[in-house]
Image (cartoon, grey):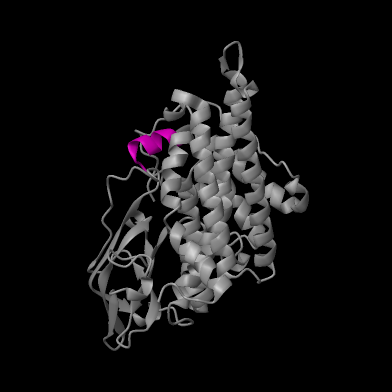
């Protein structure tokens, strides 16, 4: 585990964010939900807000925050406490993701990958020995994990993956490569999906230090700059058979993980939108032109009114999805709809907020451009904007546009 890089500058600016709940949705939440939100918000304001602009500008991942994320219960909050999870419900998970992404999408990515794409598949598809070996260390932040599905030539079509394993008796020989992997250069373990000799997809836990396994960092990103991204490269990696997740085979394994992650994004994106709206509303009260605050002009009020309307709609969509998830009734298609709608909503609000801030909106005095750049990636990862549209289209028509 690394410590904070001394070049990360800590700002003395105060995080003035105030939550906005136009339809009193907080009344639908439990006391535990509200306590979790307050705890995460306080931690974010204290530990992350003062350094996030510096991290983004320098493209440095604040790796030291993994321990803090663990302490506030951001890793696997809805997984059983037996394995280090929070034992909370799916709405609590969503609320925590929202508070993290209110600060930065990269911060939420650090947590959601660890919880939804690494801890969840080990819990859901692993055996008890694997759960006890990995989950407590992941939950505590001792281990960092990553998820290997996307390949250089296979993004929206994961079934076309070429990463493969060959049975060698007491181990599998793993070859291939994965691309655009959050946390990979700093990860201790990777949950990797590969095809066996029969063409069936299986999941394996690949550990740092296995010969032939490397994870080079991807440089030059203009988005999610506070989140570290890399590749996974496998060259004749010997993976013990006890590292294979035994309780799933086929594409339903990784897709089940993606549904969990997409659910968190549907909540998280609202946080980014709220931060942009909060900043724009406050700025419109302070910035004067032609002898009055710009918030008094009709066109500014139009922007603000439409922003809070879209946020409110997204909040209601996420809350209802959360109640369905708690009952085990949230379908992958319903999750796709919420992810697509809420991320697009957040990106549009970031753009409108930038206009309200005028020229100041492109500076690091305000979070708008950082959110906007981040959301361009969030719109694409965990299923692109267009792919989620086709998932909904397939669900309502029964006709498969992917074939």
Outermost residue toward the right in this view? 27
Res. 56 visible in picture: yes
**Residue 245 screen position, x and y as percent:** 44, 78
In this rendering, the answer to whether 75 lies above or below 24 is: below
**Residue 349 screen position, x and y as percent:** 54, 40
x 60%, y 51%: residue: 96
**Residue 13 screen position, x and y as percent:** 51, 25
- Which residues, given as a range, are shown in magenta? 52-60
In this rendering, the answer to whether 173 lies above or below 229 is: below
- Comparing 401 with 4, the one in front is 401
Outermost residue toward the top in this view? 291
Left or right: where does residue 268 sit relative to residue 173?
right
Can you say which quadrant of the picture contains the C terminus? bottom left
Res. 71 visible in picture: no
Left or right: where does residue 63 sit relative to residue 123?
left
Total residue callouts: 0
In this rendering, the answer to whether 53 lies above or below 292 is: below
> Is-magenta flag for residue 53?
yes
x 45%, y 82%: residue: 246
């Amino acid at each position: 585990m690394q410590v904070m890089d001394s070049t990360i500058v800590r700002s003395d600016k105060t995080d003035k964010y105030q939550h906005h709940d136009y339809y009193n949705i907080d009344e639908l939440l439990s006391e535990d939900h509200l306590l979790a939100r307050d705890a995460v918000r306080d931690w974010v304001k204290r530990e992350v807000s003062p350094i996030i602009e510096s991290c983004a500008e320098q493209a440095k991942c604040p790796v030291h925050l993994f321990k803090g994320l663990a302490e506030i219960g951001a890793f696997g909050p809805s997984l059983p406490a037996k394995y280090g999870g929070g034992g909370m419900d799916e709405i609590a998970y969503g609320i925590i993701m929202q508070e993290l992404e209110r600060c930065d999408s990269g911060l939420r990515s650090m947590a959601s990958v660890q919880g939804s794409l690494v801890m969840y598949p080990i819990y859901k598809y692993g055996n008890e020995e694997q759960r006890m070996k990995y989950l407590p260390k992941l939950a505590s932040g001792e281990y960092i994990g990553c998820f290997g599905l996307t390949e250089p030539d296979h993004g929206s079509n994961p079934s076309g993956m070429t990463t493969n394993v060959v049975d060698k008796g007491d181990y599998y020989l793993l070859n291939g490569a994965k691309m655009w992997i959050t946390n990979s250069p700093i990860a201790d373990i990777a949950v990797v999906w590969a095809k066996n000799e029969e063409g069936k997809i299986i999941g394996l836990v690949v550990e740092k230090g296995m010969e032939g396994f490397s994870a080079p960092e991807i440089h030059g990103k203009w988005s999610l700059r506070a989140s570290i991204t890399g590749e996974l490269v496998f060259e004749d990696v010997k993976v013990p058979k006890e590292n294979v997740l035994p309780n799933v085979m086929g594409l339903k394994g990784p897709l089940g993980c993606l549904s969990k992650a997409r659910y968190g994004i549907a909540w998280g994106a609202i946080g980014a939108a709220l931060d942009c709206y909060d900043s724009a509303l406050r700025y419109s009260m302070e910035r004067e032109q032609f002898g009055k605050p710009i918030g008094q002009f009709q066109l500014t009020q139009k922007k603000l009114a439409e922003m809070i309307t879209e946020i409110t709609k997204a909040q209601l969509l996420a809350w209802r999805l959360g109640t369905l998830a708690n009952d085990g009734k949230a379908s992958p298609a319903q999750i796709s709809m919420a992810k697509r709608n809420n991320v697009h909503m957040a990106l549009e609000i970031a753009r409108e907020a930038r206009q309200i801030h005028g020229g100041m909106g492109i500076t690091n005095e305000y979070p708008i451009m950082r959110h906007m750049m981040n959301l361009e990636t969030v719109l694409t990862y965990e299923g692109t904007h267009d792919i989620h549209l086709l998932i909904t289209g397939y669900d309502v028509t029964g006709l498969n546009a992917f074939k």
